[in-house]
Amino acid sequence: MKKYKIAKIQGPNNIEINDWEMPELYPDEVKVKISACAICTSDQGIYKGARGNPYPFYPGHEVVGIVEEIGELAATEAKVGDKVVVCRMNRCGQCPSCRKGEDNRCIKSRSLHRPGRPAGPGGFSEYLIVPDYQVFKMSKDADMVTSALIEPVACCIGSVDKADVQLGDTVLVIGAGIMGLLHAEILRLRGARIIISEVDEERRKIAEKFADFVIDPTKDMESDIRNITDGYGVDSVFVTAGPPQLVPNLFKYVSGGADMVIYTSYYQPEGAETPIDLNDLHYKEYRLVGTISPTRYDFARAVSIINANRIDLSNFIRTTVPFENISKAFDMAIEPGSYRIVVTM
């Protein structure tokens, strides 16, 4: 039986390339020859041993490639030879979350793993065989490196949807890492006025290309925001970085009825708990909401935006590294301040 190469995280700071037997396609599946896969922050956390995932684990979910084979019952507009991006989330389509269009929270997603497939998304490999609904067709001229970042764009679209952002709103984004800047890009398309708060001086300089205002939170952040908003505070906040204890302090900077979206996850040794004054939420009608993973609709919109060249994803890529050097790629990715490393096949 034919074999292909796939990367496996054996344990903390230990990733290697192994052989995997090529399975036969189910009738509803599509085989994709992988062109590139970007290293997400969640991949980095698993590699460092910070997220508690069981090993071995097959990482990689920011994936683009070329369709090589299509099952006889696969419902996809893609044809053999088409460029596609793969959304590596299992969705049953039948549970209450899926039926409501909230399939990013499919309650059966972890039980839908098919026999003969790697334990994990498995995008750092030569091939992926996936259900038809995970494949999204890209334009013929799509760049097969930058398009690996479509999945993060989809995540940010889902995040921005969690807040009631209106044309002309003033919005605060916490953090100028990749996800903070991608939030700014989506918010710009929504017609918002954007403030980015970032502690790192170099990142503040970068953020100036993406925001109307960039502030240093180690100084008088409250005065800066009051001056920008004529004393009213911002209409929404998106937290893409920072410690848990930052969140309660952010209520000082928002107007009544504002939304606060918690995009980042918390794996610090001290934990994710932080006290919040519930009277703040009660009397000022703030809305505090979390966000996790994109829906299929989020993903389809991300593909549309990138196909239409509305966002230049090259701004968010540090470099590319060939698949055979994947250990080096992961070590580069976990360096502080690093932007996306894209592994090319």
Image: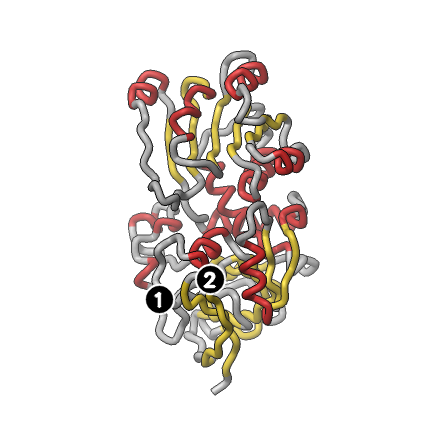
Residue type of the residue flagged with mark 1:
His
Q: For residue 30, say whether it is visible.
A: no
Q: Which mark is residue 113?
A: 1
Q: Is residue 344 left or right of residue 60?
A: right
In this rendering, the answer to whether 298 lies above or below 198 is below
Q: Quadrant of the C terminus?
A: bottom right
Q: Position of residue 1 (x, y in %)?
A: 47, 87
Name the colouring of the figure.
secondary structure
| Residue placed most toward the observer, 313 or 16 | 16
Residue type of the residue flagged with mark 2:
Asn
Q: To which quarter of the image does residue 182 belong?
A: top right
At horizontal 42% and vertical 61% (from top left) the residue drawn is: 12
Q: Position of residue 279 (x, y in %)?
A: 29, 19
At horizontal 41% and vertical 21% (from top left) the residue drawn is: 257
In this rendering, the answer to whether 315 lies above or below 326 is above
Q: Crowdedness of circle 1 by 10 Å Cα count: few (<14), some, many (20+)?
A: few
**Residue projecting furthest to the right:** 141
Q: Crowdedness of circle 2 by 10 Å Cα count: few (<14), some, many (20+)?
A: some
Q: How many marks?
A: 2
| Residue placed most toward the observer, 239 or 56 | 56
| Residue placed most toward the observer, 46 or 285 | 46
Quick check: marks 2 and 1 in contact, CB under 8 Å? no
Q: Position of residue 35 (x, y in %)?
A: 61, 66
Q: To which quarter of the image does residue 63 belong?
A: bottom right
In this rendering, the answer to whether 86 lies above or below 225 is below
Q: Which mark is residue 177?
A: none
Q: Position of residue 264 (x, y in %)?
A: 44, 41
Q: Which residue matches tag 2? A: 13
